[in-house]
Amino acid sequence: MSINQSERPEGVPLKLLIIEDNEDLIENLFAFFEPSGYQLDCARSGYQGLALAAENSYDAIVLDISLPGMNGYTLCQKMRDELNLVTPVLMLTAMDSIENKLQGFDSGADDYLVKPFSLVELDARLKALIRRNKDHYTQPELRLGPLALNLQTHQVTRSGVSVSLTPIGYKILYKLLKEAPKVLSKEVLENYVWGESVPNSGVLRTHVHTIRQSLDKPFTSQMLKTLPGFGFQLVKPDE
């Protein structure tokens, strides 16, 4: 699990895991990031990447989609579901269709960069992801009435009943719960989940609907509310 940046000793470098099988790109990444003070590990296959992610703590993971043994989509899903990692994952790929991006985000990726790309932009995006991720470690659990989100196990429950979420759904609910009962606009949530790479205008609405099916449908009162023209809000039941 990633180091809490707020507790990082001064001078300790950021640690990245690069999962990529293109030797030229690996060489370029090391040549750029190591002089900048990063500490890098590298895996050249999906299975090797999964092993390193399980054994070590990283501040961010740079993940290629087309990998030998296990593709990046499957690997990212395993890191989220089996290893319970919240480490930021930035996917690198030559595929730039909306469908590819949606698949990457749904597998648990935090950002998506299409090859060829600027190393300076990659660096900026990684630092932004690391900053956004560090608040996961300020407390072990978030609560609002009967709703609880465990930041270590990622388990979400309402009145003791498990709430099933996709990786994207988890991020949306986390942000709403952390800011509750503040109303968050569509733009704020999209920026938090996808940064500047929002797949399309309707994808947030689809994910909110899916969250509501698990969070509210089994119960008599609604916690996730939509305020037309304003955004979305989490409230205690019957409020």
Image (tube, rainbow, N blue to C red):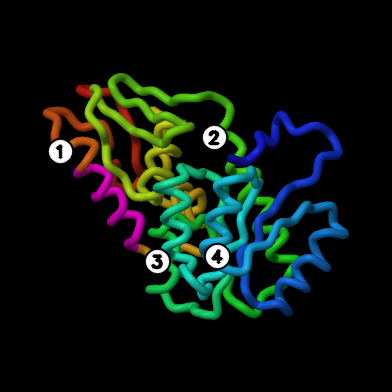
Q: Give SS at disc 1.
A: loop
Assess whether residue 81 is covered by the magenta stretch: no
Magenta highlight: main SS: helix
Q: Quadrant of residue 221?
A: top left
Question: Which is nearer the N-term, disc 1 or disc 2?
Answer: 2
Q: Compared with residue 221, is residue 114 higher up or lower down, i.e. above or below?
A: below
Q: Is residue 17 left or right of residue 109?
A: right
Assess whether residue 206 is covered by the magenta stretch: yes
Please indicate, yes or no, whether residue 179 appears anywhere in the rendered image: no
In the rendered image, which residue does mark 1 sit on?
A: 217
In the rendered image, which residue does mark 2 sit on?
A: 136
Category of crowding for the residue at label 2, using alpha-carbon neighbours closer than 10 angstroms: few (below 14), some (14–19), many (at least 20): some
In the rendered image, which residue does mark 3 sit on?
A: 102
Give x and y (percent) for residue 198: 46, 63
Viewer-proximal residue, 194 or 185?
194
Viewer-proximal residue, 56 or 35?
56
In the rendered image, which residue does mark 4 sit on?
A: 91
Q: Which residues are magenta?
A: 202-213
Question: Which is nearer the N-term, disc 1 or disc 3?
Answer: 3
Q: Nearer the viewer, mark 3 or mark 4?
A: 4
Q: Say which quadrant the C terminus sits in.
A: top left
Category of crowding for the residue at label 3, using alpha-carbon neighbours closer than 10 angstroms: few (below 14), some (14–19), many (at least 20): some
Question: Which is nearer the N-term, disc 3 or disc 4?
Answer: 4
